[in-house]
Amino acid sequence: MSDLKINSLTNEDGSYTPLRDVVFNTLREAILRGDLKPGERLMEVQLASSLGVSRTPVREAIRKLEIEGMAVTMPRRGAVVAKMTEKDMADVLQVRRALEELAGEVACEQISMSQVKELQQASDAFKRLVSDPASSINEIADADIEFHNLIYQATGNNRLMSIMQGFGEQMFRYRIEYLKEHENYPLLVGEHEGIVEGLRCRNKDEVVEIMRRHVTNQAIEMKKIIREQEEQ
């Protein structure tokens, strides 16, 4: 197991993050970086010792990792880092495609001009980040998540917003892996801009079609990434 260093408990604004969330974020980042590899055991005692915390926040973090699909409990082995599989990826993105198309369709009917402006600003922010070599993958992912969250908010449907934000946890690993491939950025920027313009014009067919391509392109690229990782 690689040496792990716990993230800071203090946020930029001076507030504190609960220890269980800090441990979760530390382990999640270690998995995404590859410091904790697929199939590697997540042993509570070792992790607690490495991070300098008790077993309780480690146990809670592992449970949350299982919810996100980043960890899985194996018979006689306990929790291990989950492998990305084509089947799991296809299942997650199939659900995402349906929900994104629904969100785009409803948003076309409900979105206000002030929300369109806010969405345009989010699209511009994403474009600036992917154009800046100093941007971290987490900053880029957060900007992508913010863009899509604004679309969900524009639907005015609280149930849909709740489902999408909860489902976002299961999509996070695939989003990160997709965003690691810099050659995908021009396509993503173009799709975001197309979605904004479609919503501005309330062109439901165009928005739904771009949403469909947006997720389909991710599925195609993720299939390549998973197959490459399996061959290594």
Image (cartoon, rainbow, N blue to C red):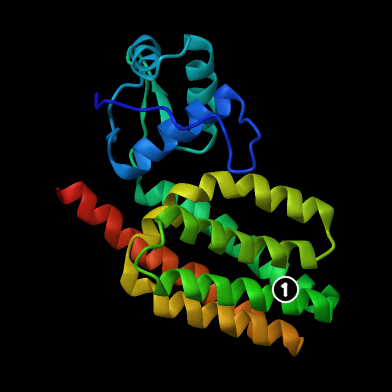
Residue extending furthest toward the front = 14
In the image, residue 118 sits, relative to residue 144, either above or below, namely: below
Total of numbered circles in the picture?
A: 1
How packed mark 1 is, by other alpha carbons closer than 10 Å (few <14, some 14-19, many 20 or more), is: some
* Callout 1 amino acid: Glu
Res. 66 in view:
no
Label 1 sits on a secondary structure element that is helix
Q: Nearer the viewer, residue 118 or 232?
A: 118
Residue matched to label 1: 118
Q: Position of residue 20 (x, y in %)?
A: 56, 23
Q: Position of residue 27 (x, y in %)?
A: 41, 31
Q: Quadrant of residue 81?
A: top left
Q: Quadrant of residue 112?
A: bottom right
Q: Residue at x 24, y 23 (%)?
A: 1
Q: Residue at x 27, y 35 (%)?
A: 37
Q: Position of residue 129 (x, y in %)?
A: 47, 69
Left or right of residue 157: residue 125: left
